[in-house]
Image (cartoon, rainbow, N blue to C red):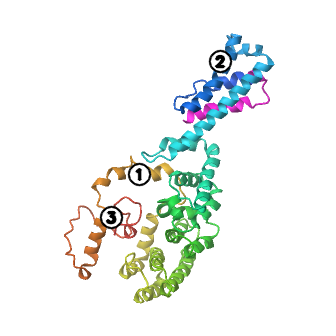
Amino acid sequence: MSENIEKVLKAIQIAEDPSLPDWQQANHACKAMSGLILSDLEPSAREQVDLRLIEINQIIASYKFETEEDYQRLSDSDASRLKELALDVARHSLHLEVERVLCQLSEREKFPKSAILTIRAHRDLFIPKLLQIIRQAVDGVSRGEKAENFDPFMAFCLLAEFEERQLHPLLMEILRLPGEAPMDLLGGAVHELLPGILAYYCVGDLNIVEELAIDLQVNKWVRGAAMSAFKYLVRDDVVSPNTAVLHLERIFEFYVTRSAADDAAEHDSMLLACAICELSDLAATKTLPAIRDAFERDLVDQMVVDLPFVEGQMANAEQTLEETFSHCRLTGLPDVVKELSWWACFGDSPQNQRLSTRKSQPERMIQRVQSEFPKKTNVTPCSTIRSGPKVGRNDPCPCGSGKKYKKCCL
């Protein structure tokens, strides 16, 4: 794919070079496209290219050229027409090749590594297309259409890898879309990648992150991801722990108030628990009395975090910070291939190949209820045989999701 793009880009550059006479532009442009692979094109698209190539060959054949210098014998009209045809073939082939690469990017049967490598090699060519994909998806969702393809997710990830600044306003727009729209567009990126990407793009204004975390119109999962961005900034020495904790304390206080209100939403206690997790991950010991009070008032979703765990985190501050930072991904998204190739959504990923051996979500939930709440149910706890070392709450979840164990299959 990349070779085809390189050929047609070179042909276009030559055919548009005003320093060359028409006969040289025609000659070198045609030569640059030698070996262009057209077999993968759709029949209708290939037919259009073939018609132009036939006319090119007819003009060249009529002169019976033997050397490149013989192109000087072209009449002005034939030289101009040959250059025009070569430029037309190159532009048309480039458009078709770009569309083919973008089509492969949306595949789920296997990870589109080849398409990603081609886009990387020609990022200036593809960045406008990737931005357009996201823009059209956002506009469609805003009109009430449901995002049903993989394109916005992959476009988002690639633009994040390229550290494209035009992604920032689009990202903020996506994150403020109502309901489940951000999840429809970005999927697992909200849980797995968004904290690190927010940390990269919002480094100059932490208030943006805090506002996302407490905006009641923003999707709850986006709010939770925004809270997680602060530890990346601390890990990267962009902000001090005290600064990050100050923002998280305000978020914590906001959700304490929300959870205690008569009109509290069902997920307010979950988001309060998320704020507590982030504070405990940064070993914010000064907030422990307020956190204990929130637990005593039964405001916290204890399916997310419990008080003994928080107290343990606070009691071992140095170890907690070390574990927290070791489990953070790299800020931003430096390598899409390395990050996404193992995701279970791709048919050929290692995780997907092991799905048949994993317990289903209901099975894991039953085991969790039996092990954590045996006195509150009539279910007889089952025996558990652990084949490996015990997984800590802050360790990566063994299911392969990339989340912490405490926020996934615990």
Kindly identify which residue carries mark 1: 342
The earlier-in-sequence mark between 3 and 1 is 1
Kindly identify which residue carries mark 2: 57
Q: Is residue 144 visible?
A: yes
**Amino acid at circle 1:** Trp
Tag shown at residue 361: 3
Q: Nearer the viewer, mark 3 or mark 1?
A: 3
Q: Quadrant of residue 302?
A: bottom left
- Look at the numbered disc 2 and give the secondary structure of its residue: helix
Q: Quadrant of the N terminus?
A: top right
Nearest the eye: 3 or 42: 42
The earlier-in-sequence mark between 2 and 1 is 2
Q: Is residue 303 left or right of residue 6?
A: left
Q: Mark 3–mark 2 contact, CB under 8 Å?
A: no
**Amino acid at circle 3:** Gln
Q: Residue 329, position in %: x, y? A: 48, 60
Number of marks = 3
User: What residue is rendered at 79% in x and 20% in y?
Assistant: 77
User: What residue is rendered at 52% in x and 28% in y?
Assistant: 39
**In the picture shown, does residue 229 fall above or below 346?**
below
Q: Residue 371, position in %: x, y? A: 26, 74
Q: Quadrant of the C terminus?
A: bottom left
- Gap between marks 2 and 1 measured at Cα: 48 Å
**Amino acid at circle 2:** Asn
- Look at the numbered disc 3 and give the secondary structure of its residue: helix
Residue count near mark 2 (Cα–Cα under 10 Å), binned few <14, some 14–19, many ≥20? few
Q: Residue 156, position in %: x, y? A: 56, 55
Q: Which residues are magenta?
A: 1-24
User: What residue is rendered at 52% in x and 32% in y?
Assistant: 40
**In the picture shown, does residue 80 fall above or below 218?**
above
The earlier-in-sequence mark between 3 and 2 is 2
